[in-house]
């Protein structure tokens, strides 16, 4: 574990400046990123925060140690879009009494969450440390972790929320600092509001913390009747549950700054009486497809799954790591234009890098300091990739005996950035010899030596499989390269 506080710089939406990152506790660096609402396949715009914050997660782990970074990414499994999807897909079964609404909702959310997990794993993303589901944080919990109902109660108790017309609303006027993140001024908003103020709201910007559910809608019992939470309160509850009242980094897409993140900040700060919710707020830019805003009506709306598994985008399937590189070729704060040409460029680049990395011996090198330094400047992935291209040229030009250090560094950098560098080249003859030797040891019942050979091969990425020849009944050992 090394202290990176001097060299890691991050752009903070809260201050609109880039500054040195100083963790609250270097032994537990804490990051929260808003995750998917699981009612349908995740679209490629959703892939961007997953990939961007995965790179940051890897970088933080590199600096502070794997055991010293906590990354929480939630799953939103309570949302009116989910109810609508459950009714659309299972309405008949519900009407026939075969399925309850809650069971139908669970089917929708579990299937969609599974798909999301497969998608982001294919994109080379590590699993977050914790992945809480909103529905598990609505009511007070047996383990005493933060929950939405208790948070809403403390907001009412502290004079920051009120009950009106069956809703609990956050009173924006009760928080002078409201609007700090989005730089929106409440008075301007009110003066400019063209929509008539809902009669029950004190101010037009007041937002829902809790609303009542009809019998056909999912609901939880609460002091304000059977209902369900508003959208924003879940992230205040789940971040507090795992990261505390104040934590280091909060991330998400640019579109979440207002109202979602602004309202998360209002809820958390007012419920806990703190000056900040998270010290650093990071936002990735928008994503367009072939120069146009992605929309179902334009016909350029693509799910991650479609790009990975179908030929609807550019007439072919795309490997996850090509999508990953294409996404990272643009700096995370810039808007990105996702196109077939960009994917082709990423694929060519990746092929060159991998060919060069293959020149390394089995031993992996150290992640080059230049690559870490580039990423440490607010995730300047493009600068890091220039280093990779430089290393690739050096690796290919290398024509001396001994270790190809550039290739080894390149390989380590690719693995660090989440690209599959595959197994080392294998010497089939040597493996054959080792297997024959192991079989002799087994015949002699020298299990220790036999196991030693098996373990040595495994360390090189070669996994042995023992079986029996179906005709002779003799022991046969096959092998495969494990990735
Ligand atoms: Zn959120």
Image (cartoon, helix red, strand yellow):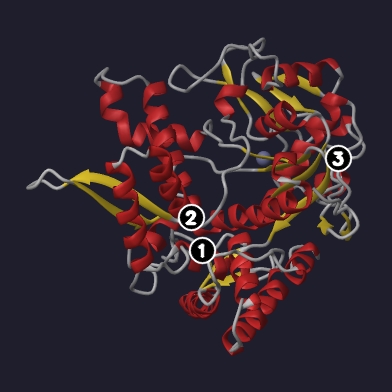
Residue highlighted by disc 2: 43
The percent coordinates of residue 188 (x first, y second) are: 86, 49
Q: Give the camera-side residue of 409 and 35.
A: 409
Residue in view at x 53 percent, y 20 percent: 213
Is residue 211 toward the left or the right of residue 478 in the image? right
Residue highlighted by disc 1: 294
Estimate the spatial distance between the alpha carbons at disc 3 and disc 2, rounded to whole Å. Answer: 31 Å
Is residue 145 toward the left or the right of residue 265 in the image? left
Is residue 117 toward the left or the right of residue 335 in the image? left
- For residue 178, the mark is 3
Residue in view at x 77 percent, y 71 percent: 370
* Local secondary structure at mark 2: loop
Q: Give the camera-side residue of 417 and 462.
A: 462
Ligand 1 resides in the quarter of the picture at top right
Looking at this rendering, what residue extends furthest in the front direction? 444
Looking at this rendering, what residue extends furthest in the left direction? 471
Q: Give the camera-side residue of 50 and 299.
A: 50
Is residue 3 toward the left or the right of residue 344 in the image? right
Estimate the spatial distance between the alpha carbons at disc 3 and disc 1, rounded to whole Å. Answer: 31 Å
The image shows residue 327, relative to residue 226, as above or below, that is: below
**Within 10 angstroms of label 3, few (less than 14), some, or many (20 or more) residues?**
some
Question: Are dots 1 and 2 in contact, CB under 8 Å?
Answer: yes
Q: Give the camera-side residue of 13 and 6.
A: 6
The image shows residue 367, relative to residue 222, as above or below, that is: below
Q: Nearer the viewer, mark 1 or mark 2?
A: 2
The image shows residue 476, relative to residue 299, as above or below, that is: above
Residue in view at x 55 percent, y 58 percent: 45
């Amino acid at each position: 574990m090394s202290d990176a506080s001097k060299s890691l710089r991050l752009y903070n939406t809260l201050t609109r400046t880039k500054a040195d990152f100083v963790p609250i506790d270097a032994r537990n660096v804490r990051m929260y990123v808003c995750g998917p609402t699981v009612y349908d396949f995740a679209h490629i715009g959703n892939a961007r925060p997953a990939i961007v914050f995965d790179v940051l997660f890897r970088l933080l782990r590199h600096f502070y140690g794997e055991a010293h970074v906590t990354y929480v990414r939630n799953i939103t499994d309570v949302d009116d879009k989910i109810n609508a999807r459950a009714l659309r897909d299972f309405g008949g079964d519900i009407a026939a009494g075969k399925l309850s609404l809650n069971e139908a909702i669970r089917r929708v959310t579990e299937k969609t969450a599974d798909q999301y997990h497969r998608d982001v794993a294919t994109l080379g993303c590590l699993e977050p440390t914790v992945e809480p589901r909103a529905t598990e944080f609505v009511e007070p919990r047996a383990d005493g972790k933060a929950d939405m109902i208790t948070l809403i109660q403390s907001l009412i108790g502290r004079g920051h929320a009120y009950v009106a017309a069956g809703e609990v609303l956050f009173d924006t006027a009760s928080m002078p600092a409201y609007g700090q993140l989005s730089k929106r001024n409440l008075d301007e908003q009110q003066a400019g509001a063209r929509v008539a103020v809902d009669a029950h709201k004190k101010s037009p910007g007041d937002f829902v913390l809790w609303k009542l559910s009809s019998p056909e809608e999912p609901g939880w019992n609460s002091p304000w009747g059977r209902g369900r939470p508003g959208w924003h309160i879940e992230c205040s509850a789940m971040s507090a549950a795992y990261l505390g009242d104040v934590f280091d980094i909060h991330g998400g897409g640019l579109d979440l700054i207002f109202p979602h993140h602004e309202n998360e900040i209002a809820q958390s700060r007012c419920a806990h009486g703190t000056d900040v919710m998270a010290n650093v707020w990071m936002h990735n830019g928008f994503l367009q497809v072939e120069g146009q805003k992605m929309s179902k009506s334009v016909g350029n709306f693509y799910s991650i799954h479609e790009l990975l598994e179908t030929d609807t985008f550019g007439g072919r399937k795309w490997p996850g790591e090509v999508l990953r590189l294409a996404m990272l070729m643009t700096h995370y704060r810039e808007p990105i234009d996702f196109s077939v040409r960009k994917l082709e460029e990423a694929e060519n680049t990746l092929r060159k890098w991998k060919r060069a990395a293959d020149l390394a011996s089995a031993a992996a090198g150290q992640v080059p300091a230049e690559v870490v330094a580039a990423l440490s400047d607010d995730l300047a992935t493009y600068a890091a990739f220039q280093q990779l291209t430089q290393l690739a040229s050096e690796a290919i030009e290398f024509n001396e005996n001994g270790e190809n250090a550039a290739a080894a560094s390149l390989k380590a950098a690719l693995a660090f950035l989440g690209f599959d560098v595959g197994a080392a080249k294998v010497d089939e003859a040597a493996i054959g010899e080792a297997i024959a030797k192991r079989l002799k040891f087994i015949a002699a019942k020298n299990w220790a030596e036999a196991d030693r050979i098996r373990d040595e091969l495994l360390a090189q990425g070669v996994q042995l499989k023992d079986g029996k020849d179906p005709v002779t009944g003799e022991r046969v050992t096959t092998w495969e390269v494990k990735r």
